[in-house]
Image: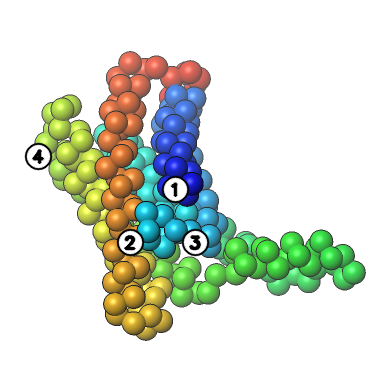
Amino acid sequence: MQNELLWLAMLLANFLLIILAYKLFGKWGLIIWIPISAIVANIQVVQTVNLFGLAATLGNIVYATSFLVTDILSENYGKKEAQKAVWIGFFSLISMTLLMNLALFFKPLEGDNLAVITHQATATIFGLMPRIAIASLAAYLVSQRHDVWAFQFWKRRFNKDNQLWLRNNLSTMVSQFIDTLIFTAIAFYGVYDTPVLFEIFITTYFLKWIVAAADTPFVYWARAIFKKGAFWVKSYT
């Protein structure tokens, strides 16, 4: 039960940090969150835990919140700003992967046990196999671009304020399905048997689906901030 409570607390913390970033820095606060979520998710993904009786990685929450941010950007600032955020996130993900894997080629200081331990820990976190890195990048780019397109697609059909929850969930839940499918197929096809592969897909998508359903109030909160212009640092809005 401890893991589940911590997971819910982390979920709430992610949502509140997004709102705080928006209140402080306006549109740029949201854009900043995209590379934060991409980088943190790829660090947390190495930690596997048991949640609700399922094996899961911690990176699912923070990664899933990036869809919330692109939906808020699409709603309040339009398609171009959301697409800009997606490309910034993609660039940050490539940069982190490249720079941290280059760092692993350095030899730790001889005789310094702490340096050796630190190097080994860094290798554990950032020494991703090329296949995993490619899976992550492909899933991110395709799913995020779909999310921006889908939100605008549904917005043209359900454009009333009280239908915001509908366009948010329709775009996000399908995009996260695409993301999970691409990542699982590229990263694990041929590594695990089909039943195990299917279980990984189902459990990963299930947790992302919970995040998508839970983010709806925060989409409305961000919409209210935008309409009122209730930003704390006006020069960033």
Q: Are marks 4 and 3 in contact (CB under 8 Å)?
A: no
- SS assignment at label 2: helix
Q: As displayed, is residue 64 above or below residue 191?
A: above
Q: Secondary structure at mark 1?
A: loop
User: In screen coordinates, is 110 left or right of 161?
Assistant: right
Q: Earlier in the sequence, mark 1 or mark 4?
A: 1
Q: Residue at x 53, y 74 (%)?
A: 129
Using the numbered discs, state the Cα–Cα distance from disc 1 to disc 2 in whole angstroms: 18 Å
**Amino acid carrying mark 2 in the image:** Thr
Hey, which quadrant is residue 53 in on the image? bottom left
Q: Residue at x 46, y 71 (%)?
A: 132
- Identity of the amino acid at label 4? Arg
Q: Nearer the viewer, mark 1 or mark 4?
A: 1
Mark with earlier residue (4, 3): 3
Q: Nearer the viewer, mark 4 or mark 3?
A: 3
Circles 1 and 4, Cβ within 8 Å, touching? The answer is no
Disc 2 designates what residue? Answer: 203
Asked if labels 2 and 1 touch by Cβ distance under 8 angstroms, the answer is no
Residue beneath disc 3: 48
In the rendered structure, which amino acid carries the disc numbered 1?
A: Met
What is the CA distance from the residue labelled 3 to the residue labelled 2? 12 Å
Q: Amino acid at mark 3?
A: Thr
Report the residue marked by disc 1.
1
Measured along the vertical axis of the image, is residue 93 above or below residue 13?
A: below
